[in-house]
Image (cartoon, rainbow, N blue to C red):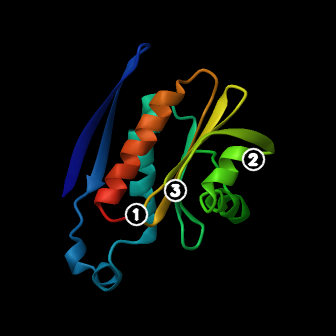
Amino acid sequence: MLITKIYTFNTKQYTLRLCVKMADLDLSKKPQFQAYGVPDAVKMNQLSNLLQDALVSTGHVHQCALVRRKDTNVRASSLGFNLYPDQVSLLLAAFKNPAQTREEGIYYDDKQYKCVRADKNSIYAKCNKRGLVLVKTVTLLIIATYTDAMFPSVCVEAVEKLADYFKEKGK
């Protein structure tokens, strides 16, 4: 049996209707799903969709990623946003001493970012009119960037709300 879902995207220039046909899968009868749960690829796709819906769709988040703190593994990221484990380690290290981070700033993407706010859960930094927002949850680090055409306050609000969602879920 096929299920058809219709998605409508409205922008100022055009309206796009997208029909997607999906197979109606009974996952309970598939042994690979019974033994191991949902595959990582499906989880990553769900997290990528969550990033898209909660952050990028605001129009005030340029790029973003969700990183598992314990192993610096990127769980999901926006299109074209590539982070390396050593970059993530440096960003996580900034949370260890917020006072020093406020004083020295953060080196990210070959630029020195001036720290605007740093505490045990959040770090906001800017370089010229671009910015970086880092928010820690129990198990994750949310990383978001904004550009000069975006409002930093909207980016911060969206990232903090997503972090609150993960904190409520215990993640």
Mark seen at residue 42? 1
Above or below, 83 against 5 in this view is: below
- For marks 2 and 1 on the same chain, the one whose residue lies earlier in the sequence: 1
Q: Nearer the viewer, residue 19 or 132?
A: 132
In the picture, measured across the screen, residue 110 lies left or right of residue 128, that is: right
- Name the image quarter holding residue 38: bottom left
Q: CA distance from mark 3 to mark 1?
A: 31 Å
Q: Residue at 81% across / 45% down in the picture?
A: 110
> Which residue position is annotated with label 2?
104
Residue mark closest to the camera, 3 vs 1: 3
Above or below, 146 against 78 in this view is: above
- For marks 3 and 1 on the same chain, the one whose residue lies earlier in the sequence: 1
Question: Does residue 1 appear in this view?
Answer: yes
Density class for disc 3 (Cα within 10 Å; few <14, some 14-19, many ≥20) is few
Q: Amino acid at mark 3?
A: Lys
Could you tell me residue 63's position as x and y percent?
58, 41
Q: Residue at 65% across / 60% down in the picture?
A: 88
Label 3 sits on a secondary structure element that is loop
> Which residue position is annotated with label 3?
120
Residue mark closest to the camera, 2 vs 1: 2
In the picture, measured across the screen, residue 157 lies left or right of residue 87, that is: left
Label 2 sits on a secondary structure element that is helix
Above or below, 90 against 123 in this view is: below
Q: Amino acid at mark 2?
A: Glu
Question: Does residue 105 appear in this view?
Answer: no
Q: CA distance from mark 3 to mark 2?
A: 16 Å
Q: Amino acid at mark 1?
A: Val
**Quarter holding the C terminus?**
bottom left
Q: Residue furthest right?
A: 110
Label 1 sits on a secondary structure element that is helix
In the picture, measured across the screen, residue 121 lies left or right of residue 26, that is: right
Could you tell me residue 35's position as x and y percent?
32, 86
